[in-house]
Amino acid sequence: MDVFFKIVPPRDSTRRMRKFPSTLRGLYAATEYVQRAGKPDLPNELLGHACIGAGTWKLSNGSAEVVEVAPTFRVSTYDPVVMCDLVLTGLGIAVLPLYMARQPGISQRLVPILPMWHPRPATISALYFGPAALAPKIKVFLDFVAEILGTERDPRVKEAPFEGLFGRPE
């Protein structure tokens, strides 16, 4: 294997790494869920709601303040497609990529939750072995990926408005 991609870069790796633009995310629920369960006003109120996802949610309000919330998940998954499908059925609140939540046909069915609080962006990283001089085939491939990911050509964008979907590599 020459290259593999990870959403969360490893903290300690012997592999070389190239990061790509981060995917901005937000908290969302279906309109039906909000009508039934209400909306939290503060991050710690997420603990009293049905949540979909995994791990600890780290939320920032734009300042240096970061709040960690460890909800009890109704469904535990890292797959954003599964999370979006479950949110759309009214099952609970999830962290979704903005490129997904802003798609026409989906965005009208979702309600932003805690819009002043933002989950950490997800950064895609390519990991590979190799000497300091990168093999030409790997360099060409990673340069090609860099021309697409986080741009208007990114296949994940589809019909969502492009502005504000991606950030700098973390």
Image: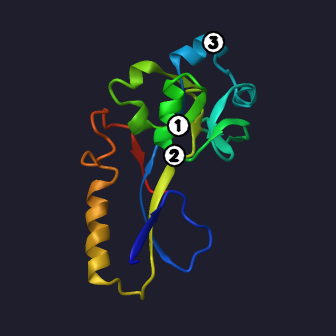
Secondary structure category for the residue under label 2: loop
Cα–Cα gap, marks 1 and 2: 6 Å
Secondary structure category for the residue under label 1: helix
Q: Is residue 50 above or below residue 156?
A: above
Cα–Cα gap, marks 3 and 1: 19 Å
Q: Amino acid at mark 1?
A: Met
Q: Position of residue 138 (x, y in %)?
A: 32, 77
Q: Amino acid at mark 2?
A: Asp
Q: Which residue matches tag 1?
A: 83
Of callouts 2 and 3, the N-terminal one: 3
For image coordinates 28% across by 70% down, the residue present is: 141
Q: Nearer the viewer, residue 150 or 50?
A: 50
Q: Nearer the viewer, residue 164 or 6?
A: 6
Q: Amino acid at mark 3?
A: Arg
Relative to 36, 156 lies left or right: left
Using the rendered image of the protein, determine whether residue 21 is visible from the camera's viewpoint: yes
Q: Looking at the rendered structure, which numbered label has been put on residue 79?
A: 2
Q: Position of residue 53 (x, y in %)?
A: 61, 41
Q: Position of residue 148 (x, y in %)?
A: 27, 55
Secondary structure category for the residue under label 3: helix
Cα–Cα gap, marks 2 and 3: 25 Å
Q: Nearer the viewer, residue 118 or 127?
A: 127
Q: Is residue 110 above or below residue 122?
A: above
Q: Which residue matches tag 3?
A: 36
The quarter holding residue 160 reads: top left
Way the structure is coloured: rainbow
Local crowd size for mark 2, using a 10 Å CA cut-off: few (<14), some (14–19), many (≥20): few
Pointers 3 and 1 in contact (C-beta within 8 Å): no
For image coordinates 63% across by 12% down, the residue present is: 36
The quarter holding residue 18 reads: bottom left
Pointers 1 and 2 in contact (C-beta within 8 Å): yes
For image coordinates 57% across by 46% down, the residue present is: 120
